[in-house]
Image (cartoon, rainbow, N blue to C red):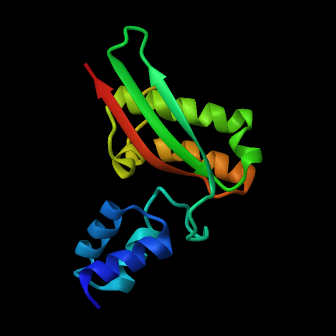
């Protein structure tokens, strides 16, 4: 199987983006099963959760009061019931503020980073908390920040 087909298969089976799949395949020296294990062990997906891409999501943004710092975070979940809840909105706003504060542009690095307001926790801990409360697959799809 060619490398392109392996990446395509990883993307379809795991729901991860192109870069994550390529990195996992490189780390596994081209072995598809090892790359799959690598992706399953990543912190932006809870262990034991289905490898499906959540179907509903929302875009959250933060704009600093001086207009020189902004961040956008896309957060996915399984149902619109959760997506429209206050807990999900609070999660998204916290993640957007965190992304702006640390100038995040990579989901994996962003989720592994310490929270600015509580260095004893990581950004991924916020996702884990909402997952436990809602019993839904909640994950960050993308993160982007800009500074002027």
Front residue of 84 and 39: 84
* Residue found 53% across the figure and 33% down from its top: 60
Q: Residue at x 39, y 48 (%)?
A: 107
The residue lying toward the viewer, choosing from 52 and 87, is 52
Q: How many marks?
A: 0
Q: Residue furthest top?
A: 66
Q: Position of residue 97 (x, y in %)?
A: 46, 27
Q: Quadrant of residue 21?
A: bottom left
At a point 38% along the width and 43% down the height, the residue shown is 110
In the visual, does 107 lie left or right of 132?
A: left
| Left/right of residue 10 with respect to residue 82 in the rendered view | left
Q: Nearer the viewer, residue 73 or 47?
A: 73
Q: Relative to residue 97, is residue 52 depicted above or below?
A: below
Residue 42 visible in the current orientation = yes
Residue at 43% x, 9% y: name it. 65
* Residue projecting furthest to the right: 81
State left or right for residue 27 relative to residue 64.
Answer: left
Image location of residue 148, percent across then percent down: 25, 18
**Image coords of residue 36 (percent x, y):** 41, 77
Q: Position of residue 122 (x, y in %)?
A: 46, 42
- The residue most toward the bottom is 1
Instruction: Identify the image quadrant of the N terminus.
Output: bottom left
Image: 78 above or below 85: below
Vertical arrangement, residue 91 with respect to residue 131, above or below? above
**Is residue 110 or residue 113 the one in the foreground?**
110
Task: Mark yes or no: residue 119 visible.
Answer: no
């Amino acid at each position: 199987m060619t490398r392109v087909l392996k990446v395509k298969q990883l993307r379809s089976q795991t729901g991860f983006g192109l870069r994550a799949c390529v990195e996992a395949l490189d780390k596994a020296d081209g072995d598809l099963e090892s790359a799959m294990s690598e992706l399953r062990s990543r912190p932006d997906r809870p262990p034991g959760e289905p490898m499906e891409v959540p179907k509903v999501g929302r875009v959250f943004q933060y704009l600093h009061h001086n207009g020189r710092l902004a961040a956008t975070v896309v957060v996915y979940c399984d149902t619109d019931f959760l997506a429209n809840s206050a807990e999900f909105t609070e999660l998204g706003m916290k993640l957007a503020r965190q992304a702006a504060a640390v100038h995040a542009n990579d989901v994996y690095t962003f989720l592994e980073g310490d929270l600015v307001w509580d260095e004893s926790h990581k950004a991924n801990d916020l996702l884990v908390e909402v997952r436990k409360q809602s019993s839904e697959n909640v994950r960050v799809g993308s993160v982007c920040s800009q500074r002027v």
